[in-house]
């Protein structure tokens, strides 16, 4: 009853043709709403262009998918708790994600959170790794149903994402570090968690500059510009790197990213036009202000 008669898969949006046959509107309609064929595949009669929605059947379909999704979540949780999830665990998670996509994770927020928490627990198992954007998606789903008493522990949990940047840099994986920076930026924007996003970008910039010339110059420039754009979008001011001369901060990227940094500290003595290679390390007691308020 819930299967698409054309492909044998579970329907997403059931409707009825003018010939009386039930089909999946997602299957038989083009993106612009036009019917893909002019005659009925079964009765061969000419069809009207409309495919009428079946509200009662769609409600039944959602109830079926919700029940199946919850069964998948329960089964996946049991496999995870066994301590050694087999291949079926990954298959269950893929199927559950497919059902959740059909239902809408922004609507079925509690089911989305249960699935996200299982994903999160799975990432902590040995030899399992989750891409940064998937981690961001997990935290965004959990955030939707947080109660006031859960916010503090949630923020502490999310801050573990910062370690992903440092671990990637320690292993020399700059592309992965960049993905972690972008994921942290997304979580900060959606979940309002005070992640030190700009400091992460600065860590990446400093690492790239420190490795120069072993790192291609275009990669260093890309990271510098990305850091600058991140701070601009977050209204945090300009990129700031510790000045090795006075311990304050180097600011402003000039039009030419290959150019020089300028120290904007009024106490700086001498020529304030410094090359990038001279601004890697500052006073050991200085720290970049994530809000861009320091001088």
Image: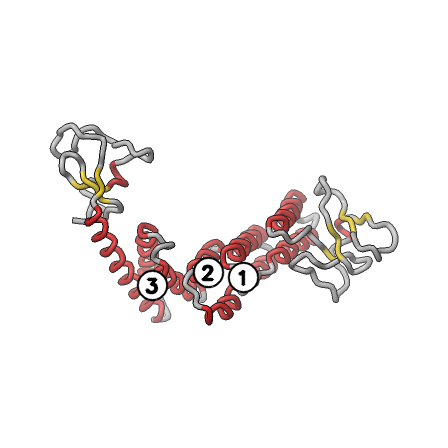
Say whether disc 3 or disc 1 marks the residue closer to the N-terminus: 3
- Residue 253 vertical placement versus 279 (above, below): above
**Residue shown at the point (56%, 50%) measured from the top left:** 175
Quadrant of residue 216 in the image? top right
Q: Which mark is residue 139?
A: 2
User: For numbered disc 3, what is the local secondary structure?
Assistant: loop
**Residue shown at the point (84%, 57%) measured from the top left:** 267
User: For numbered disc 1, what is the local secondary structure?
Assistant: loop
- Residue designated by label 3: 86
User: Which quarter of the image is occupied by the C terminus?
Assistant: bottom right
Say whether disc 2 or disc 3 marks the residue closer to the N-terminus: 3
Say whether disc 1 or disc 2 marks the residue closer to the N-terminus: 2
- Residue 95 vertical placement versus 27 (above, below): below
Question: Disc 2 or disc 3, which is closer to the eye?
Answer: 2
Q: Which mark is residue 193?
A: 1
* Alpha carbon distance from label 2 to label 3: 25 Å
* Alpha carbon distance from label 1 to label 2: 10 Å
- Left or right of 85, for residue 185: right
């Amino acid at each position: 009853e819930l299967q698409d008669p054309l492909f044998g898969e579970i329907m997403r949006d059931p409707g009825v043709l003018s010939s009386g046959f039930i089909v999946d509107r997602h299957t038989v309609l083009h993106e612009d709403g036009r019917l893909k064929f002019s005659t009925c595949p079964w009765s061969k009669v000419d069809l009207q262009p409309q495919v009428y929605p079946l509200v009662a059947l769609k409600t039944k379909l959602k109830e079926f998918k919700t029940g199946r999704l919850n069964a998948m979540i329960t089964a996946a949780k049991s496999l995870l708790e066994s301590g050694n999830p087999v291949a079926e665990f990954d298959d269950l998670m893929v199927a559950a994600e497919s059902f959740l996509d059909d239902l809408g994770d922004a609507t079925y927020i509690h089911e989305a959170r249960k699935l996200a928490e299982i994903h999160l627990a799975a990432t902590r198992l040995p030899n399992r790794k989750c891409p940064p954007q998937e981690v961001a998606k997990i935290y965004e789903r959990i955030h939707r149903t947080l109660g006031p008493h859960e916010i503090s522990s949630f923020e502490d949990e999310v801050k573990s994402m910062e370690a992903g940047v440092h671990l990637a840099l320690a292993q020399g994986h700059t592309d992965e570090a960049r993905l972690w920076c972008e994921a942290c930026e997304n979580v900060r924007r959606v979940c309002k968690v005070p992640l030190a996003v700009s400091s992460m970008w600065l860590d990446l910039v400093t690492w790239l500059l420190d490795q120069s010339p072993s790192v291609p110059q275009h990669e260093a420039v890309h990271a510098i510009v990305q850091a600058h754009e991140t701070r601009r979008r977050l209204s945090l001011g300009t990129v700031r790197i510790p000045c090795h001369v006075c311990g304050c901060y180097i600011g402003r990227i000039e039009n030419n990213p290959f150019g020089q940094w300028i120290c904007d500290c009024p106490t700086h003595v001498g020529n304030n036009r410094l090359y990038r290679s001279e601004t890697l390390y500052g006073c050991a007691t200085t720290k970049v202000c994530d809000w861009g308020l320091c001088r």
